Image (cartoon, rainbow, N blue to C red):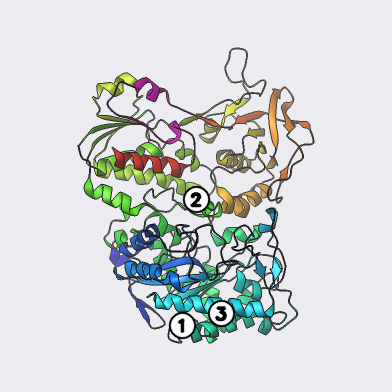
Amino acid sequence: MAAGSYALAFSPGRIGNLEIKNRLMNGPAIPNFSRRSGEITEREIDYYEEKAKGGFGAVFVSGTSVNDTTARSFTNQPGIQRDELIPGWKKLAAAIRRHGAKCGVQIFHPGRQNHPKYCGSGAVPEAPSAIPCPMESQVPGYRVVEMTVERIREVIDEYARAARRVREAGFDYVEVHAAHGYLPMQFLSPLTNARRDEYGGSFANRTRFIRELCAAIRREAGADFPVGMRFSADELVEGGLRIEDTVEYASLLEELGCAYLSVSAGMYVPSGLYAMIAGSYSPPGHLEPLAGAIREAVEVPILQYGGITSVAGAERLLQDGTADFVIMNRASIADPHIVRKTREGREDGVRACIRCNNGCVDRLFAMRDITCTMNPELGREREFAEALERGARRRKRVVVVGGGPAGMACSKYARLMGHEVTLLERETELGGLVRFSSRGPGRAEWDEVTRYYEREVERLGVEVRLGSEATADLVRSLAPDAVVVATGSRFHCPGGIRGLRAADGRLAANVAFLPDVMQGKAAVGQRVVIVGGNHMGVQAARLLSEAGRDVTIVEARPEPNQDLDGFINWFGFLLPDLERRRVRLLTHSFAVAVTGAGVLVESSGDMPPLFAVGPLRTVDTEATIPCDTLVVGTGRSSRSEVFEALQGTVPELVLIGDAAKPRWTYTAIGEGATAGIAL
């Protein structure tokens, strides 16, 4: 579509006294790039500035702690709790504003949704009531204390002083993160507030904290400084806040002078997880009904979340009238220039978010800096910009062996550096194992990994040779100056399972490899046992159960699916989905033999899974699972034969991606891009 097709998305809008050049915002998401003290880093400035360069009307800086102790719940979270931090924030505000974008800071206190090991100075999590967080309490050492009235007022002052610093640093507005069960929502929700004083009980008492907080911010930061509120329109848990409650709450927030309301949903309990950061198993815009209900109750602008990955999707919400501005959080991570590219009519050049949550959400909750499956430049914006501007010191003839994610990314960036690139792929299509990641209900967005890089290598003039088995002789015949081997990995038969192979060494008739099952190349009986609960094993189970098969997954680890779909997708969607499908999960368990009666499974001990919810089980000591087909999906080994054959015979040789070591897709793409700019 031409840019003119998105009349509302590209039209200016107002929040309080601010005019914003368009209706598209990046949304707050902690990148974990700050120093441990909360100080803003140059890397963080580059990260946010790129979004402003990319055309967003407003840029949020997210999850900013209001104190040094109980408000810090991530290792490298930004902080604005002391005046001496303001200079770094001033640099960040200036970097964003010089590109015509407005900028704001989201201030944050997690309340009970924290852990003592992340609190500073020996503090412990604090909350309206000492009601544990169901998920944090699974981690040893967790405890939470009830806040005294004196402490409540201290925290309100901490928020207010933080808002004043936001204004002094040159930002245009401040947002209070009151969604997802964080501290302000804990006061409001009867699920987390059991107080019997003036801060608990009635609606008026449960809203006292937010009323005093808004008044304190206005006193400290100025009545003309726009204050927004992000909140969960539905906590999606029994006993929690539902939309009927939050419509009344939204009206109160408007009365309190909030300049806008940012509508989200959910909290940190299994039933409320997925709505917070929904993956590809829900359609983009899944929060529209909730936002629409809030929209009808108030006059102030509504900011809507919901996994929107394109300007076209944002335009639809704006046309529907359920949003005044649209948050494109993960879309801005995958491609910070999505707005500019779309406005220029270059939508084919957009790196669309696939909502996998692997590099952003899952790494953040693992206390690591975020990255992105689609965007290898994330967090390295300056490094890539300088390399691509400089270009290669010498133009080389580069041969890339393998057209999976690593090879495609390497080909793109090597070509951008000015090299002549030939990409060899033995299959008849690009994509490698990532093609299988798109199989299964709700997985189609993974196809965008291959589609994007196919478009890019074609646009840049990479010579792609499909159906070309890259032997060492073939590679040498191309007279390369540099060879990058990205031949990926293969599934292999695990050791220790008796009966996998027939006497002639071939797989037994009732045994199949997982990729063959995913592609429909293997015959599968009614009763299926999948050995290996990795993401492909889980997706195969969903596919087969949808086809009416009886499926059991055998997994040695405490939890299946730890390699790709991650924390939010797994506990928020996939685990309940498998339960609905009656897929049986055996954890802490090993398949030891294929017999005429089925598969013999042994338990490694009656150890509970990390989060004991859903259909997770373990066998007592051993059991035979009736089985018509055993699907092998445990483990992959690198395909490095070509690399080994080429050593010492070509001028430059590099090994990347799964060919070096099977890992995540974002790792493969990141290594490919890094190799491309390093040649």
Q: Nearer the viewer, mark 2 or mark 1?
A: 1
Q: Which residue is mark 1?
A: 221
**What residue does disc 3 label?**
157
In the rendered structure, which disc, 3 or 1, sits on the residue that comes first in sequence? 3
Which SS class for mark 3? helix
Q: Nearer the viewer, residue 661 or 327?
A: 661
Q: Quadrant of the C terminus?
A: top left
Residue 268 to residue 660: above or below? below
**Marks 2/3: CA–CA distance:** 38 Å
On residue 356, which mark appears? 2
Of circles 2 and 3, the one toward us is 3
Q: At label 1, which amino acid type do we have?
A: Ala
Q: Nearer the viewer, residue 589 or 579?
A: 589
Residue 162, image x, y percentages: 49, 75
Instruction: Name the residue located 61 percent from the left edge and 25 percent from the top edge.
Output: 511
Whole-angstrom CA distance, mark 3 to mark 1, is 11 Å
